[in-house]
Amino acid sequence: MSWDELWQAVQITAAYFSQELGSRQQQIVSVLLPNSIDFIVTYLAILHSGHITMPLDPAFKPLELDAIIRQIDPKLLITDARYGDQLDASQTRIIHIDQLNDTASPKQKPLRLPAKEQVASLTFTSGTTGTPKAATEPGAAAPSPEATPTPPAAPLAPEQILAAGPRNPVGVYWIDLAKADSTAPLPYGLHGTAIPNRMKTQESLGGLRLTNWDIARAVRMLPEGTPLAWK
């Protein structure tokens, strides 16, 4: 597919979303598709129509998809036959990718709000200690560094020390990591967990999380300066 063909496909599909969702209020459209040209066209078409795209990971289990859809309540959900059977059609309107109507008028007017108000996408994330939530991405582009004067640097906050004990966010231990040619610690490290029952369902945002007994063993086995290689 050439760039021109991609743009034509995006315009046609965007016209469909504009026709179905209108141009007065932003609506959320979930996309459950594998990495493919269909995903790219659908994602860009939702953005071009002015509505909000929310990609869903095909690796999610049916219960995870069900929980997300119940929480976010998208107006439409675009998928294909591969994933359609995993979804509860009573929760939201499901449209298979091959059923997208390409007869919508290309003159459909896209929804446009002030740049700071228009949301481009929702990304469903999870944190080390928090509950899963949707993070919004604004439609406004970041200002150019050349056009924006650099504000003076804020004074550094006083050093903060995590309270001792297994209930702090990094568990019982934290091991600093540094690049091979430096001793300055990186902003992430090896650490334990305050929520051991969620080891398989939550992601760490501050490093590489281990169970508390594994990080305690690592402290004993890895003296300072031990080289690590990621594979």
Image (cartoon, rainbow, N blue to C red):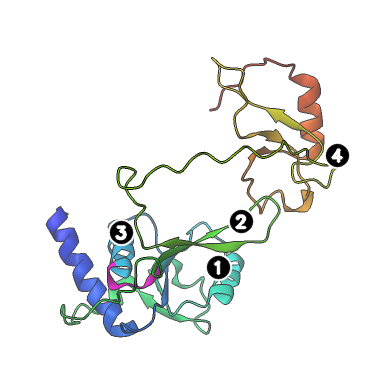
Circles 1 and 3 in contact, beta carbons < 8 Å: no
Instruction: Please give the name of the residue rendered at 44% of the width and 72% of the height, measured from the top-left corner.
Output: 84
| Mark 3, secondary structure of its residue | helix
Q: Which residue is mark 2?
A: 126
Q: Position of residue 59 (x, y in %)?
A: 51, 56
| Cα–Cα span, label 2 and label 3 | 24 Å
Q: Residues within 10 Å of mark 2 (few under 14, many from 20)?
A: some
What's the residue type where badge 3 is placed? Answer: Ile
| Quarter residue 71 falls in | bottom right
Foreground tag (1 vs 2): 2
Foreground tag (4 vs 1): 4
Between 36 and 203, which is closer to the camera in this rendering? 203
Label ID, residue 40: 3
Q: Which residue is mark 4?
A: 164
| Quarter residue 150 falls in | top left
Magenta part of the protein: which range?
48-52
What's the residue type where badge 1 is placed? Answer: Leu
Question: Which residue in the rendered view is the most extreme toward the right?
Answer: 165
- 103 lies left or right of 42: left
| Cα–Cα span, label 1 and label 2 | 14 Å
Circles 2 and 4 in contact, beta carbons < 8 Å: no
Q: Which residue is mark 1?
A: 65
Instruction: Please give the name of the residue rendered at 76% of the width and 40% of the height, measured from the top-left corner.
Output: 211
